[in-house]
Image (cartoon, grey):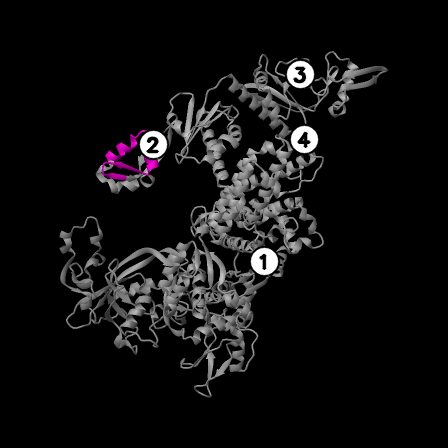
Amino acid sequence: MSDLPPTLDLPGTESATLEEWTSNDAFKVQDALSIARGDPEYTFYDGPPFATGLPHYGHILAGTIKDVVTRFACGRGFRVERRAGWDCHGLPVEYEIDQMLNITHREQVLEMGIDKYNDTCRSIVTRYTSEWVSTVTRLGRWIDFENDYKTMDVSFMESVWWVFGQLHAKGLVYRGYKVMPYSTACGTVLSNFEAGLNYKEVRDPAVTISFPIASEGWENVELTAWTTTPWTLPSNLALCVHPELVYVVVKDVVKNKTYVCAESRLCQLFPAMNSKKYKPKDAHKHYEIVKKCVGKDLVGLTYTPVFQYFKDHSSSSRFWKVLSDTYVTDDSGTGIVHQAPAFGEDDYRVCLKHGVIKKGEEIVCPVDVNGLFTDEVPEVKGVHVKKADETLIKLLKESNRLVQKDNLSHQYPYCWRSDTPLIYKAVPSWFIRVEDIRDKIIENNKKTYWVPSAVGEGRFHAWLRDARDWAVSRNRFWGTPMPIWASENFDEIVCVDSIDRLEELSGVRVKDLHREFIDDLTIPSQKNPGTVLRRVDEVFDCWFESGSMPYAQKHYPFENKEQFEAGFPADFIAEGLDQTRGWFYTLMVLSTALFDKPAFKNLICNGLVLAADGKKMSKRLKNYPDPKIIVNKYGADALRMYLINSPVVRAESLRFQEAGVLGVVKEVFLPWYNAFRFFMQNVERWSTSQSSTVFVPSIEKVKSSKNPTDIWIGAATQGLIKYVHQEMEAYRLYTVMPALVRYVTQLTNWYVRLNRDRLKGSEGEDDAETGLQVLFDVLLDVTRIMAPFTPFITEYFYQHLRKMLPSYSERVDGGGTSNPVLPGKSDSVHFLKLPSYDASRLNEDAVASMEMLQTVVELGRNVREKRNISLRTPIKNVTVVMRSPSPAVVAGINESLRGYILSELNAWDLNVVPKDEEHQWVKLSLQPNLKKLGKKLGKNMKMVKEHITNMSHADAISCMENGELKIGEIVIDAKTELLSKLAFAKEEDHWEATESATGDVVVAVDCTQDEAIISAGTTREFIGAVQQLRKSAGLTLADSVEVFYKEGSGLSTTERAISLNVPMVEAKLRGIVPLPTQFAPAWNVEISKTAVEIGGSPVEVSICRPSVAAKEDVSPELCSYFSTLCVSDVEEKETINVVIDGKKFSLKNGTDFWCSTTDKLRSLKKLSYL
């Protein structure tokens, strides 16, 4: 025990613990014990991350939350399957391969061969899994990596087919065009969620274009439209106005042209109007209004397109007309919007609604899958759309269609993988009819419990309320192929939902479901005998796969049917805020579509971990510390506690600060360890003092203690246990962690400090044992309740504490890994059940009294600081005024806790002012609550405020007790509309006071400084110097010494102070009275010496080995003899008979020698104060 280091190496200790867990298969043992007991299942889903990148703080945060909750569930008596999963398919993997192989076009993959491409994808999928396993394990998370699931597993993919098959059978699947965010670099559509992940500030050309009206009666008049995507103009098929907006036909007097635009947007055509110097009276210099109309009057007008590329299109008779829709606004542009249905979601909707395009028809789209113009627009053929703007603008200018050209800075979506600009593009896709089941999804969301609730009821609900049909297909290669076989014109479709069904229909049994194994399989047509159905080209969006994970990880319904259905919906899931539009959403959609149930019951949604400057963490910018460095420097427990004791657990953002992790170490772990080490040292000291009696924990001794701090810390511990259970059942980690941190502070800063001397035996070894029993009990309880949160340090504490328990002997021969689990017997704290609270030990009075003690002590220290009085200098009196304290609190402060307050404040007397004497010490001041009374009183506020602030103490007390204040006809509620505060009222200079923040407690200190006070302060300074000298010399509590000091010439300040405070000195130095160096024996052996300043004067202090003292003028031979003696050799002897050089000596104890210099001086009455 005594070999515990002064400071715990947290990272090193954690590494050693990890080795133990690994060698003993601790996680597997814990799970096996749970299964053997038949613990009920607690279902947890772990969203699969991509293993193509390294884990970052976001993963660490979510993983920590998951680990805490699942460990806690195990501790509550549940069995939790914690199975790791990996998202293996989709863009993240393909993008890596495309970069590696320099693939820029889809055709390159087809030339290479899908089999080779997918093999390459497969080869990197688990590239970083070893790093993931290493990092996650190092962070203390217990999760099963050996029995993991992968979305590329055939069993997983088959269940995904089953999910889709169920949706298809329910009529929830259809094929259609949809304008979607599209990555030209990756050649595939993205979900709206993915499109919102990476917005950037960009500068794009903004052009205003003219469209000459072709309708009769509108000769020489041109419609105008504004766009920031000139590259979409070759695909323009219509113009759209707002039906109720006012439009003007306006003549540009400078250009001599006539345009149409919204009246409110004339400034778009005439930029001079945007200048501060512009005056309306100068309008005639720029334009003339020809006529006005509303938007609906323009509907049906035809116009000449800007480009003629599609004038011969089979549907061109429906093109190039003015349409109307209320989505058009006048906050920018001209109030007329150009419509390119292939590249705009609203454009597509409006053109479809007005018959410009029709379902089932090909859409005008001169852009290929890689974002390059086709030969339909020869001037920019093969040019990427975002690079074609300048050429097209030049063509517009040459054709006299360019009205204005500018540049605009705005936020624009970029592909989250390739970091290239997205476009919106109409593509044929397979959709889930989310809109058809939207109401059911919303109802199912109401059955779930979110932390924080605002995310589920606000952000997520809003997303569901506006949910649109979900495009689940992607034109890619590495993914789960869509199980649809169709005829060429899609008039016959077969959806395959299993490998068996595929064999039945195609005649081929496959062992893998990736494209290279099934793309060539055909199914005979039932509708057109002699022809075959072929599989569609698409694969599933990886979000469909992750949304299917509850079923697919179990290979449901092909295996584990009963187990899955018994555990569905899941009890708990957790991920980041960004998953409200991702995994949380896809889980809810699919579970509703399949079973009309939510996929989960409880969810914790965490916020984002940002860099210290508030920006997104960036590997490129290196604006955050590597997680491995942090863990190796401070330990995983510190990082875990820092993260889950922050706003990020409430779905708010956290600016990661390394200093915050260090703060956890300094403010929580080191004090906690110091309390633990202090306990272990004093158990050893107590055992030694009791002739090596073994310390045996006894709950009976704990409960029988009458010490008020023992009762308080026991009550606080039971209250903590109750609170943690209550809050964890509500998944509120953000309330649990602050409570745990506060408790550790209470334990270390208050209980241990208040009882330090007592635990060292200053009040007798029986009382010391009682205190140690209490400290053991609370240390073990807090170790167990904290185990899910800080798994390493609690394991370290447990392994030491368990050895004291009688059941420790049962650990042998497999007992430590067997049921029933017991503290002491069980080999890990994580095998144990969490402690349940003992209601009989809850004690509100004890807790309230201790809170008051802490308030009084802290206010008293504040007073000392005000007057610059050192804590070593005593104060004569502390007076406390409490507003409406309970009788128990008054009794506690006046009686059982009185000594602790006096000791903490180094005070000689404590006075608790009774209620009938309060007015002599304080005045109750009242102020109006302006927030509450402002509107209520209006012009009467001044009068009311003057009345309230001038009330006497007695009137204020009466007002608060009555609960209301009447001023004429005005009635004020005292509790809610008044602010009250006690203020010190005495004016004598020797008093100094301060009030609590709530205004309920006032502490006043008598700051009088006389000789007794000053000498006591000097004595405490000296005692502190001695204790520091002992510590620096490496002495233990059991080591006895003698203390001598030497003051400067002519000074006697220290001796005078000690002489006036001998009882204090003896109490603090365990019976020793320091003496002037002149009295030290010549044979004295010095251990250590230091020069210090005591009471403003230099003093040399030395600590020496206890020596036998002799009478004055002793012979040289006896001097030599006495120098060889140990005190322990003679302390029990009355006479020593010795022969030296043939001479016989008979030496008497108390006459010729003494066992210490103090005994000698006291016996000979050499110093009056002895």
Front position in the image: 266 or 9 = 9
C-beta proximity under 8 Å, tags 2 and 1? no
| Residue neighbourhood size for the residue with mark 4, other residues' Cα within 10 Å, grouped as few (<14), some (14–19), many (≥20) | few
Q: Which residue is mark 3?
A: 1162
Disc number placed over residue 1038 in the picture, else none: 4
- Quote the CA–CA distance across marks 2 and 3: 58 Å
Q: Residues within 10 Å of mark 1 (few under 14, many from 20)?
A: few
Residue stretch in magenta:
942-971
Of label 2 and label 1, which has the lower sequence position?
Answer: 1
Among the two numbered marks 3 and 4 on one chain, the one whose residue lies closer to the N terminus: 4
- The amino acid pointed to by label 3 is Arg
Between residue 1110 and residue 285, name the one nearer to us. Answer: 1110
User: Which residue is label 2 attached to?
Assistant: 925
How far is disc 1 from disc 4 in space, using C-alphas?
A: 51 Å
Q: Main secondary structure of the magenta part?
A: helix
CA gap, disc 2 and disc 1: 66 Å
Earlier sequence position, callout 2 versus callout 4: 2
Residues under numbered marks 2 and 4 in contact, where contact means CB atoms less than 8 Å apart: no
Q: Is residue 951 magenta?
A: yes
Residue at the farthest right position = 1142
Of helix, strand and loop, which one carries label 4? loop
**Residue 1050 in the image: above or below residue 39:** above
User: Tag 4: residue type?
Assistant: Ala
Q: Position of residue 468 (x, y in %)?
A: 37, 66
- The residues tagged by marks 3 and 4 sit, at their Cα atoms, a distance apart of 24 Å
* Residue matched to label 1: 130
Q: Is residue 359 above or below residue 1039?
A: below
Observer able to see residue 678: no
Q: Amino acid at mark 1?
A: Ser
Q: CA distance from mark 2 to mark 4?
A: 55 Å
Q: Is residue 857 magenta?
A: no
Mark before the other along the chain sequence, 2 or 3:
2
